[in-house]
Amino acid sequence: MTALSLLAPLTLADVVAVAREYRPVAPLRTGENPRLEASAAWVAATLAEVATSERPTPYYAINTGFGDNAGRATFRTVEDAERLSRNLLLSHTVGVGEPLPEDAVRAALLLRAYSLARGYSGVRREVVNTLVAMLNKRVFPVVPARGSLGASGDLAPLAHLVMPLSAPLPGEDMNIPVATGYCFLNGQIVTGAAAMHAAGIAPIRLGAKEGVALINGATVSTAIAALAVHDALNVLHAGEYALALSAEALRGFRDAFLPHIHGLRNAFQAEAAEVVFGYVAGSTLIRGAADIDLDPAEGPPQDPYCIRCAPVVMGAAARALAHIEIALTDEINAATDNPLIFADDDPDSPEYLPRRTKMISGGNFHGAPIGYLMDYLALVMTDYASIAERRIFTLTDPRLNRGLPPFLIPERAGEAGLNSGLMLAQYTAASLVSECKVLAHPASVDSIPSSANREDHVSMSALAARKAAQIVGLVRQVLAIELLCAFQAVHLRLEQLPEARIGAGTAHAIRLIESLEVAAGRRIGVIRTDTPLRPYFDTLDAAIAAGHFAPREDFAE
């Protein structure tokens, strides 16, 4: 696997590859990024100037404190600047709650290294390369999930993330283990110092501005968001197969998927309908002809909305995900530190600035773009689960499922009601959807002022991202349940109509599901008597997460 370059634009696929597939990242070589080296040299020269000046100019984050402390004093020496960076990390490791999963932590390490490698943060190449080494040697910091406001970025979680990188300064009380942070090592929590030593990575003594550069920006929010969007796309694709299977099992009408109507609205809806239409191609279970009106004896082509309107909902969801992915790609490529440094020969420096290095304080760290995107994702995915649950309900209710057995369990003579079948599968789906609805309340509207009101408007982007990721996981479980119910229902329908044929795409989905092991040596098959359903749910959930239900056009075996 080729190493990822920090000097090329990142994609969501790059983030997933590094976070989950352990793709290596190439360290920066000397002279490879002149902008980075120029901004670091400017910080060093500025600090030297401050040290010799009778009345030193205050440079935010170089020789001043942070937040409301910024105007209280200026510092004079290299040692003060180092202590300022180190103190910032020590004071900001205040996160609480369960640790973030390894993939989110790895994604955050990558995005922080990439942002700093842009060269606007005034950090040394050594800082970036230490983050890269942590990725490549699989150092896994313990990052508590809670504590960020998404204001000056994800301050608390990022402090936990980078603490193992920071070497303690002389005179620190090393009896306090948090001084080097914590990491997971071989399934155990150890000090950051122990984990870095085991990986053969030397912590570095942070210099001026490097502490704030490491923790400024909504990096953890963005990392969680990137993985959530990737997972959401897998869920959407699984939903297309689930809809096709459910429509066939319910003997739904083809008309709702014909291209004639969807082209009159928008391309995303038309594509969603086209995919499902392709999956049921060749099916004799689906009713109605593609090019003629229905026989009146068939009844009006009026399936429940969970079938008939599904292309509309799926198309809207796909359009939302496309927008979110584009906007999120901007975020993973952003420079989000504060202040940012523009060297005198920087081609990105605006023409109206004087031809000298300019340090600009702004608000690039603010997490509003991520918060909005994740609240949108939460809303969209919750509704995706809601319509899927309605199909599950329709499949299991004998008054709605057009002649299938109650709760999708075959009944032998004299055994009616002996088995509950998939009754409780719908219960679980309903519970999951209700939980999604509670979690879908937007986080980005809930600002709470902080830092003596200097940070008077915050984004709550980390909370929005964590909620959205949680919702995506819950929706994936709902789709796993629909796939199981629809799989069972299609088999039962074919037993009723042995001469019937299913579509090419649905046949592929059936084969895929039948290839999955629900337990050692036992593959998924038709359920004919009550059995624990949780293993079926888990198996299908894992298959969706792994991308096994990716869209296809060729269904040859």
Image (cartoon, grey):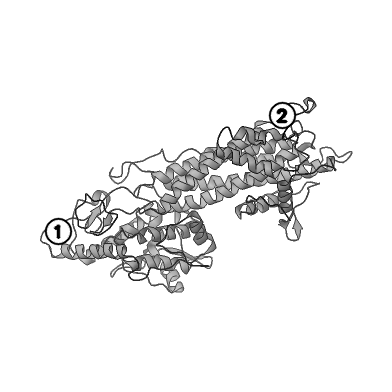
| Residue 331 in view here | yes
Residue at the far top: name it: 296
Q: How far apart are marks 2 and 1 (CA)?
A: 79 Å
Circle 2 or circle 1, nearest the eye: 2
Q: Dot 1: what SS?
A: loop
Residue visible at 47% across and 60% down? 106
Q: Dot 2: what SS?
A: loop
State the image coordinates of residue 359 (x, y, percent, origin top left): 24, 55
Residue type at mark 2 is Pro
Residue at the far right: name it: 413
State the image coordinates of residue 226 (x, y, percent, origin top left): 48, 52
Residue type at mark 1 is Pro
Q: Is residue 63 above or below residue 317?
A: below
- Tally the marks: 2
Indicate left or right for 335 with 486 as reference: left
- Residue indicated by mark 1: 56
Q: Nearer the viewer, residue 42 or 106?
A: 42
Graded by Cα atoms within 10 Å as few (under 14), some (14 to 19) or many (20 or more), the crowding at tag 1 reads: some
Residue at the far front: name it: 291
In which quadrant of the rendered image does the C terminus lie?
A: bottom right
- Residue indicated by mark 2: 301
Tell me which label, 2 or 1, sits earlier in the chain. 1
Residue visible at 46% across and 54% down? 223
